[in-house]
Structures are given as structure tokens and as C-alpha cells.
Image (spheres, rainbow, N blue to C red):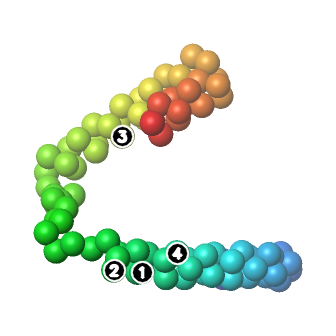
Amino acid sequence: MLIVLAVDPELGWRLAWPVGVATVIGLVGALYLSYLGRHEQAEHSDPGDKIETSNPLELGTAIRFAITLTVIIVLSRAASAWAGTSGLYLVAGFGAG
């Protein structure tokens, strides 16, 4: 909103109500889900149940992510050249899955 107000003040003031309402609705939903999560976690927490996690900044994880991202970018460029917009939707579907 600050950027919009700086670039076009009239548009910023027109967007104030919709953005404000969306912000309030999002905050209320987040607080409600946070409230539900705290009670659910307290009911189901067992000190013996530990989730194994790994460091996402390890070199292997970063390389796998870079390779995956590179493949998706190359496929999207190829699909765009071959089939236009529908090819991009196809690659986006595979990338999201």
C-alpha cells in the first residue's frame, strides 16, 4: 500500500478499504487457526514423538533444489516455444505436483 500511495495517491486511497478489509479478514483467520493449533498441539503432543528434520541449507539440498528449478525453467521455456500458453500451463501443473 505504501508503494501504491507513493506512485499514485488517488489509487492508493481507493484501494485502502478493500486492502484493509482483506487484511483484517486474513488476520482474524490466522489468529483463529493459531488458537486451534495451540489446543490441538496440547492435546496430541507426546514427548516421544520427534520429527526428524534436516538442515535445508546443506549443499546437497541446495543442489537438488537448483537442479529442479533449472529443469522447470528449461521445460517452461521449451513448452512456451512449442505450445504457447497452454504449454506453460502443462509445465506448471507438473511443477506444482
Left/right of residue 34 with respect to residue 26 in the rendered view? left
Q: Is residue 58 visible?
A: yes
Q: Residues within 10 Å of mark 4 (few under 14, many from 20)?
A: few
The circle drawn on residue 42 is: 2
Rendered view: 60 above or below 24: above
Whole-percent x and y of residue 64? Answer: 23, 41
2 and 3 marks in contact (CB < 8 Å) = no
Q: Amino acid at mark 2?
A: Ala
Pointer 1 or 4: first along the chain: 4
Q: Residues within 10 Å of mark 2 (few under 14, many from 20)?
A: few
Q: CA distance from mark 4 to mark 2?
A: 14 Å
To which residue does mark 1 refer? 39
The circle drawn on residue 69 is: 3
- Which element is circle 4 on? helix
Residue 82 occupies quadrant: top right
Pointer 2 or 3: first along the chain: 2
Left/right of residue 83 with respect to residue 16 in the rendered view? left
2 and 1 marks in contact (CB < 8 Å) = yes
Whole-percent x and y of residue 65? Answer: 28, 44
Q: CA distance from mark 4 to mark 3?
A: 32 Å
Q: CA distance from mark 2 to mark 1?
A: 5 Å
Q: Which quarter of the rendered picture does the C terminus lie within?
A: top left
